[in-house]
Amino acid sequence: EAFRELLFEKIRSSQNQETLKVKYHKGSKLEGVTYASSRFMGVEQSNTSIIYNNSFVLKFFRRIYISTNPDYEINRFLTERQKFAYTPAYAGSVNLSYGDDENITLALMQVLVPNQGDAWTYMLHVLDGIFDRLRQKHIAIDALPQTKLFRKQEAESVPETILEWTGMQIFYRVQKLAQRTAEMHIALGSDMHDTAFTPAAYNSDYTVWLKNRLIYQFQNRLNTVENNLHRLSGPALERAHEFLDRKKEIRKRFLDFDWTKLKGERIRIHGDYHLGQVLVNDDDFYILDFEGEPESTIRDRKVKQPPLKDVAGMFRSFHYAIYATIFGNEEKYGSPREQLFKAGEILYRYMVSTFLGTYVQQAQDGNLNIGYTHEIEFLLKYCMLEKAVYELGYELNSRPNWAIIPLEGIRSIMNYI
C-alpha cells in the first residue's frame, strides 16, 4: 500500500523527475483531494488498475507504445477540453518523456463512475426476457412485421405487434445510447484548433490506407476460413462456403470506396465501440476505453475515420448480443433455433433503425457532417462489412460454433439492397 500511496501523491503533486524522464500530471478533478485508501481492482484482460478513495481508478497500460495512448489522449480531450460528461472524467496520468514533446503513456487516472455493470451484460438480460416472451405470449414469429435495416425511425413508431412482444424499454435504451454516441462524436469533431482532433475530408491518401489495410485483412480471413472448414457444421458451414464463393464480390465491395463521392468528414473516433465498452448508470450510459482496435497499430488507431464506423461497431454488437442470447438459452425458449434466428434478425433491424433515427438527428442538430442518406447507408454497409470480416477471424480461432454470427452478418450486408 505504501507504493500505491506514493504513486497517488506523485500524481496529486505533479512531481516530475527529470533524471527518470517520468512525468506526473494532475487533472482538475484531483484538486484538494487527499489520499485515504487504495486497492487493486479485479483482474482485467488488458490492464492493471488501482482504486483510490473508492472515487478514482488508476489504469496501467500493459501494452506500451512509443506514443501517447489514444485512451489518455481522447479521455483528456473529451473531459477537460470539451466537457463531455458521459465518459469517466480525466484525473491524472503518468507519462515517460523521450524527446521534444514526445510521451509514452504509462498510466491514466479517471473518476470512478457508479454503475450497474456494462451494457453487454445488461443487454443480454433484457434480450433473455424478450426471447422468453416468445413462448409466454405464443408469438407467431412468421407473422412479425419486417423493417428495412437502415430505415430511420422513433421508438414510438415501432409496430404494435413488435412492442407486444418486446416491450418499449429496449427501444428507449437504444435511443439513449444513440444520443450519447452522437454527443461523443460531436465533441470529438468540433475542435478547430487542435490538429489531432480537427475534422478532415476524405482524400486519396486515406483511401489508399483503407483499401490496403482491408484487402490484407480480408485475405487473412479467407485463409482462416479455408483452414477451418472442418470445424464447422450445419448453417455455419453453408455460410462459410457461401463466403468463399462470394470472395470476389466481397473484395470488390472493399475496393469500391470512392472518396470523391463522399461529402462528410472524418474525425477521431472510439475505434473499438461495442456494448462491452459502455457502462450502465441507472437509465443512462457512460462510454469507456478509447484505446482502439486491438489488432491495429498505434498509428492506425489515431487515423481520422468516419464516425459511422463506431455506429457500425455498435450494430455488430447488437447482432452479437441477440445471437449470444439464443445460443445460451435456446432450450427454454421453446422454438427451433432457425425460428429464433428469424425473430432475432427482425428484432435486430428494429434496434438498428431506432438507433439510427436518433443518432442521425442528433448528429445533424450538432453540426456533425456525416453526409446525406445515401452516403450514410454506404458508409454503414462498408464499415459493418469490415467489422464482420474482422470478427470472423476471432471466432474461427477461438470459438468456431459462433462463426455463424459474423458469417450471417456478412451475408445480410452483401444481400442488402
Image (cartoon, rainbow, N blue to C red):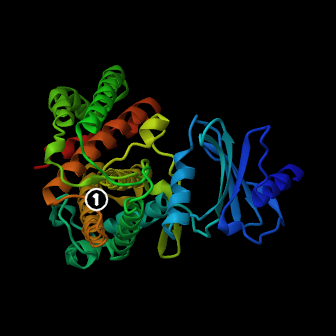
Q: In the picture provided, is 81 more to the left or to the right than 173?
A: right
Q: In the picture provided, is 32 more to the left or to the right than 332?
A: right
Query: Which residue is situated farthest in the right direction here?
Result: 2
* Residue 279 seen in render: no
Residue occupied by mark 1 = 348
Q: Is residue 231 above or below residue 85?
A: above
**Front-lying residue, 84 or 216:** 84
> Which class describes the residues within 10 Å of circle 1: few (<14), some (14-19), or many (20+)?
many
Q: Position of residue 4 (x, y in %)?
A: 82, 52
Query: Which residue is situated farthest in the left direction here?
Result: 417
- Dot 1: element: helix
Q: Position of residue 17 (x, y in %)?
A: 79, 44
Q: Residue at x 49, y 55 (%)?
A: 277
Q: Position of residue 167 (x, y in %)?
A: 33, 75
Q: In the picture provided, is 301 more to the left or to the right than 153?
A: right
Which quarter of the figure has residue 136?
A: bottom left
Total tally of numbered discs in the picture:
1
Q: Residue at x 25, y 79 (%)?
A: 156
Q: Position of residue 122 (x, y in %)?
A: 48, 64
* Residue 11 seen in render: yes
Q: Amino acid at mark 1?
A: Tyr
**Front-lying residue, 47 or 237:** 47
Q: Is residue 265 above or below residue 33?
A: above
Q: Residue at x 47, y 58 (%)?
A: 120
